[in-house]
Image: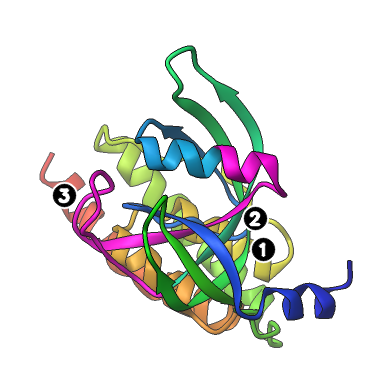
Amino acid sequence: MDSAHRLGAMSGEVLPMFPLQTVLFPGVAMPLHVFEPRYRALTRHCLDGDGRFGVVLIERGSEVGGGDVRVSVGTCARIVEAAELPDGRWLLMIVGVERVAVRRWLPDDPYPQAEVDALPDALAGADAVEQRSAVERLLRRALALKAELGEPAAPLTVELDPDPAVAAYQAAAMAPLGPLDHQRLLEQLGPDERLALLASALTDEVRVLAQRASWG
C-alpha cells in the first residue's frame, strides 16, 4: 500500500488504545506483558484483526485501573509476536509503525479507544547526516557513563541507522532520559528537530552523569 493511501486511511480511524508509562517510537520494538482484563480483550480484538493498536504515554496516573491522564500524540503499533499464557495473560512483542494524533477519546468500555489521525514526519534537511553523527557520539558517551555508574543502559557499541530519520527514533528510544523527555522527542515535527533536541538533552545528561562519576 502506498504511503498516501495509508495516511489517508488513518485519518479519523478508530484505534484501540493502550496507555503506558513509557513512550513507543516508530520502528522500535517493545515487549508487553498484558494482564488486565480489558487489555486482554484488546489483545484478542487486535489479533483477530490486523494487529494494530495505539500506544500513548500516561501523563498522570497509573496503567492499571483507569482514571489516567493521557497525552494526545502517540504511536500506532503492530503486534509481531504473541503468546497466551495458561491463565489468560499475554506476552507480546510490538513494533511502532507511525506517529498518530488523538482527535478524540471514545468511552473506555470495553477498553480505551480513540479517533486518530496519522502524523507524518517532515523530511530531513541538509544538515541531518551531521546531526545524526553528533547524536551518536553523545549517546555513546551517555551510555558509557551510565555503565560506569553501574546503572542499566543500552549497549555501548550502539550503531545508529545511516538514515537520519530512522536514527533519530533509535537514539530517542535508547537515550537515558525520562518519559516526558521521550514524549517531547516523539512530538517533534521531523528528524531535524528531533536530532537537535536529542543533542541538547544528551549534552545536558552527559554533563550531569560526568559530574556524578567524578564524585566516585
The three-letter amino acid code for the residue at tag 1 is: Val
Q: CA distance from mark 1 to mark 2?
A: 7 Å
Can see residue 90? yes
Callout 3 touching callout 1 (CB < 8 Å)? no
Q: Residues within 10 Å of mark 1 (few under 14, many from 20)?
A: some
Give, as a three-letter code, the residue at label 2.
Gly
Would residue 164 be found to the left or right of residue 36 on screen?
right
Q: Position of residue 151 (x, y in %)?
A: 28, 36
Q: Position of residue 5 (x, y in %)?
A: 83, 77
In the displayed structure, would residue 188 be above or below residue 87?
A: below
Q: Foreground mark, 3 or 2?
A: 2
Does the segment drawn in magenta span residue 48?
A: yes
Query: Which of 11/137 is in front?
Result: 11
Between 181 and 164, which is closer to the camera in this rendering?
A: 181
Q: Give how far apart the Cα atoms at labels 3 and 2 are.
A: 33 Å
Task: Name the image quarter holding the C terminus.
Answer: top left
Question: Helix, strand, or loop for circle 3?
Answer: helix
Q: State the residue position of label 3.
A: 212
Q: Residues within 10 Å of mark 3 (few under 14, many from 20)?
A: few
Please say if the residues under marks 3 and 2 sit with CB atoms less than 8 Å apart: no
Which residue does the image show at 73% across and 61% down from the upper left? Answer: 162
Residue at the disc numbered 2: 27
Residue designated by label 1:
166
The tag earlier along the polypeptide, 1 or 2, is 2
